[in-house]
Amino acid sequence: MNTIERIRFLADLDRYLELLKKLGPEPSVGLPFGPSNGNMPHVWFVDSVSGNTNNSGVRPNEALTTIDAAVGKCTASRGDIIVALPGHVETVTAANGLDLDVAGITLIGVGQGADRPTVNLTTAVAASMRINAASVRMENILITGGFDNITRVLDINGVVDVELLDIEYRDVTGQCAIFLHARDGSDRLHISGLKYLGAAAAGTTRALQLDGCDDLHLENFYIYGNFSTSAVDFITTLSARIWVHDGFVWTENAADLCFVDTITGSTGSFARLNLVLQDNAANVTEAITGLTFQIVDQNGVHVVNLVNEKAMLINWTETTDA
């Protein structure tokens, strides 16, 4: 759901709620968000500023205080939607402290900039949020690392058809070790509009760690940080048929690695990428390391390793028809 679709959805939802108010608490067509509606998607509202733990969550003025509480009210594979309202803050202090573990749910954040709903990880290096069910979508959420050396911020636990849309991560206290770890079997993962704003100082190994993510689609992303291993690392189990395009990576680490296939068996294509390296060295070829990858020269992959220089097309061997 893009921004325009989100606005339309919220406008339609507002009109629907006004209609329900006029119809009264129990209209003849049945309860709008209750069990009598069978498989109709339910909508739950979350607001840490004005919500209450005793609220129903079915209307903005009856919002719950946590996303976690709203997840607990969702039914699997019904298409339930959780709407986090502007200014909402969810504090996570333990492993899987926020667990999106109901299949088919959508978490949508309302607002932009500083008004976006925020998930802040703090207190312990083990603090994390997890997606532990198939077909979960998360959109327009700001995630902040409020504690140094968080092991993994977001864990996709080997579940399929997850979508992350317009998600932003920021290092606030120190650096996280890894932002996103998608475990083996996280197939058909779609990440679009990711903005990763890491710290310039050392401490992070990877922004994205991807293990056996067949048919991954990574697009329209901005990644900045100091990555000792690589900004994006494909590990352990090969990921087949990945498609990475329209992105920007800037690494402050002298390793100068933006994409690495540690397993050296993953397959896929890269196109329309801009990569900025820390060293002014003979390092352009290695910015993407993985002999089974392909570069699509469709505005290509451009790499630069010094200020006041024009980026060059990555100098991999050109395909021939021989």
Image (cartoon, rainbow, N blue to C red):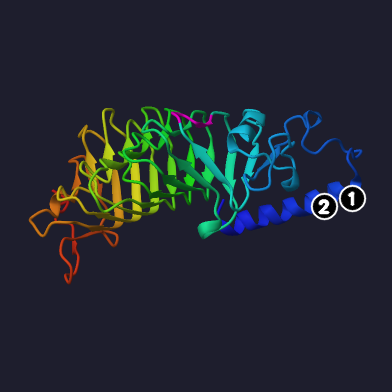
* 244 to the left or right of 3: left
The residue positioned 28% from the left and 28% from the top of the image is: 237
> Residue tagged by mark 1?
22
Residue 78: x, y in percent?
Answer: 66, 32
Q: CA distance from mark 1 to mark 2?
A: 6 Å
The residue located at (20%, 43%) in the rendering is 228
Q: Is residue 51 left or right of residue 122?
A: right
Q: Amino acid at mark 1?
A: Lys
Q: Residues within 10 Å of mark 2 (few under 14, many from 20)?
A: few
Is residue 317 at all visible to an observer of this figure? no
The spot of residue 214 in percent (x, y) is 37, 34
- Position of residue 274 in the picture relative to residue 222 (left or right): left
Asked whether the beta carbons under mark 1 and mark 2 sit within 8 Å of each other, the answer is: yes
Q: Residue at x 64, y 35 (%)?
A: 70
Per the rendered image, the range of residues in magenta is: 94-100
Circle 2 residue: 18
